[in-house]
Amino acid sequence: MKKIMSFIFRCIGEDKKKNIEYILSFIYLKQFKEWSNKKKIVYLLTPNHGNMGDQAIAYATQKYLSDNFSEYDILELHRDEIYKYGKSIKKILKKDDLIFLHGGGNLGNLYINEEQVRRFIIEKFPDNKIISMTQTISFTKDNEGKKELKKTKEIYNKHKNLTIIAREKTSFNIMRKELVNCKIIENPDVVFYLHNTFKDELEKRKNIMTCLRSDKESVLGENKRMFLEELCSKYNNVYEYDTVIHKGLDKFTREKELNDMFNKFSRSKVVITDRLHGMVFCVITKTPCIVTKSLDHKVTGTYEWVKELNYIKLVDKLDFNIIESVIDELINLKDKSEINFKKKYFCGLKYRILK
């Protein structure tokens, strides 16, 4: 039977498959009956892939919600489960229950599948308060981007109780302009909530680690290999790494993989990155970092929250002749400046969300 259903779904296409899944999703109601009388948060759109930035957002969001919304039980579903269980979830939701949506850098048309699922939830759950955690918005300026932005505006602006948290100023301004019926809050990326979780053990720091993109958001192109060759010719302890691992993860396996990754950052003298969460992981592990700009405004915008930290340096481009002196400066840095992210940005966030 499974083979027959798999064949049918391949023939009809992914979109029709998801619609059929949603239509039939009431059949799983018994699975969620125990949640009916609980005061709850339903946390949706969490990742089941190996992008550790997304997994860190999910981990930090769960920790933030557990610490600050302790009167609620938390039910987490990954991105595609909303089609499978949607109508059952709708049945167990009470008026005062909250829906939180996973944050990130995917409110736009660069990762359109993520945006389509978010629209689906906002459209199908009109009666509950929905909070989208820290997000970057970025639609391209071409016809495709304009078309997708129009769809997003129509769906988001119809919802009567939608709050979106922008994680940098540019996104905040765009959201206020385009999503006029939504409540827009500005706050740093939720992963900063993990700050001061890790000890700064200087004696364990051995490597210069690179954490550079090789996907469609990379702006380095062919310059990446040249830069790495120059770096390795000067330093003999260079370690190449990326925050994407090639296996699936879920809420049961993410913490172990994240701790393994955080250890890599904690054992580095300096990290050179073009990834937003490469920079954020350096902040929370107190690892000296050189970060360069990305395809959109998310890295430069997020840097504004941390620019007073003397161990995080933003450069226009990864030109070895320019950053060699910055590497040496950071390796020899004695005292690191501090920001209390929890006290400054997260203590009052619940009030801002719910007021």
Image (cartoon, rainbow, N blue to C red):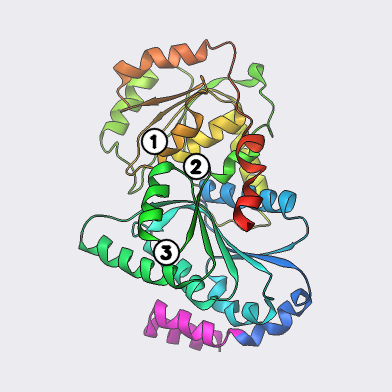
Query: In the image, residue 74 lies at what x, y percent?
Result: 71, 62
- For the residues bearing labels 3 and 2, Cβ distance under 8 angstroms: no
How packed mark 2 is, by other alpha carbons closer than 10 Å (few <14, some 14-19, many 20 or more), is some
Q: Nearer the viewer, residue 304 or 27?
A: 304
Q: Nearer the viewer, residue 330 or 340?
A: 340
Against 300, residue 337 (above or below) is above
Q: Residue at x 57, y 78 (%)?
A: 84
Against 345, residue 207 (above or below) is above
User: Which residue does the numbered mark 2 point to in the structure image?
Assistant: 243
Of labels 2 and 1, earlier in sequence is 2
* Circle nearer the viewer, 3 or 2: 3
Q: Is residue 186 left or right of residue 353?
A: left
Residue type of the residue flagged with mark 3: Glu
- Name the element at disc 2: loop
Count of numbered circles in the view: 3
Against 61, residue 237 (above or below) is above
Of labels 3 and 2, earlier in sequence is 3
Residue type of the residue flagged with mark 1: Thr
Instruction: Say which mark, if any, is on residue 115.
Output: 3
> Which segment did they paint magenta?
1-25
Q: Residue at x 60, y 55 (%)?
A: 353
Quadrant containing the C terminus is bottom right
